[in-house]
Amino acid sequence: MEAESWLKQIEKVFQALRCPDEEKVLFATFMLQGEATDWWEMEKGKLGPDDAPFIWEEFKKVFHEKYFPQGIRFQKYREFDRLEQGDMTVAQYAAKFEEMSRYAPTLISEDSDRARKFENGLRGRIQQQVAAFELSSYKDVVNKALVIEKGLDNAQAARERNMKKRT
């Protein structure tokens, strides 16, 4: 996903520099190197004399088609759709959830959808306790899951201490 990272970095630079939309393609293509430069020259060559130059959204579209093909996007979509906490901590799961969520924006277009998706992927015991609060915001679900996990961890540690005292 090197190409995806590059694109995210370029967009961070645009934001920091307050780069106007009409300059984004020029700046981004200036930053291309090696094979990507050759690819861009070919893309530009496809434009006819009456065609308008690329705007940023069009550039991102052709860039994704080249460096992040539909098959890989679908694979990432499915990976996010199936994402569950498993052996991860809630914090690790939240980080993975946020990282992967960009591949399936339609699944979590609303904050409440995002909250349900995250909640449904939690481990059973944590999910059961979080669900009882009927939280509708993603941030609230994550925070409650972190609190519940800490409580469960503390209870487990106390049980283990009690077991050691008995032996």
Image: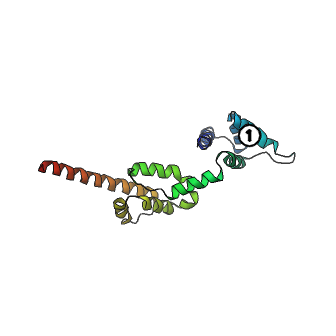
Residue 120 in the image: state x and y as whole percent.
Answer: 43, 62
Q: Amino acid at mark 1?
A: Trp
Q: Residue at x 57, y 54 (%)?
A: 75
Q: How many marks?
A: 1
- Does 90 sit left or right of 77 as displayed? left
Q: Residue at x 81, y 47 (%)?
A: 52
Residue 79: tell me if it is visible.
Answer: yes
Residue 58 in the image: state x and y as whole percent.
Answer: 72, 49
Local SS, label 1: helix
Residue 29 in the image: state x and y as whole percent.
Answer: 71, 38
- Does 55 sit left or right of 72 as displayed? right
- Does 88 sit left or right of 34 as displayed? left
Q: Is residue 101 above or below residue 13?
A: below
Residue 8 in the image: state x and y as whole percent.
Answer: 59, 43
Q: Is residue 128 above or below residue 77?
A: below
Q: Residue furthest right?
A: 49
Q: Residue at x 66, y 48 (%)?
A: 64
Q: Is residue 134 above or below residue 39?
A: below
Q: Residues within 10 Å of mark 1 (few under 14, many from 20)?
A: some
Q: Pointer 1: what residue? A: 39
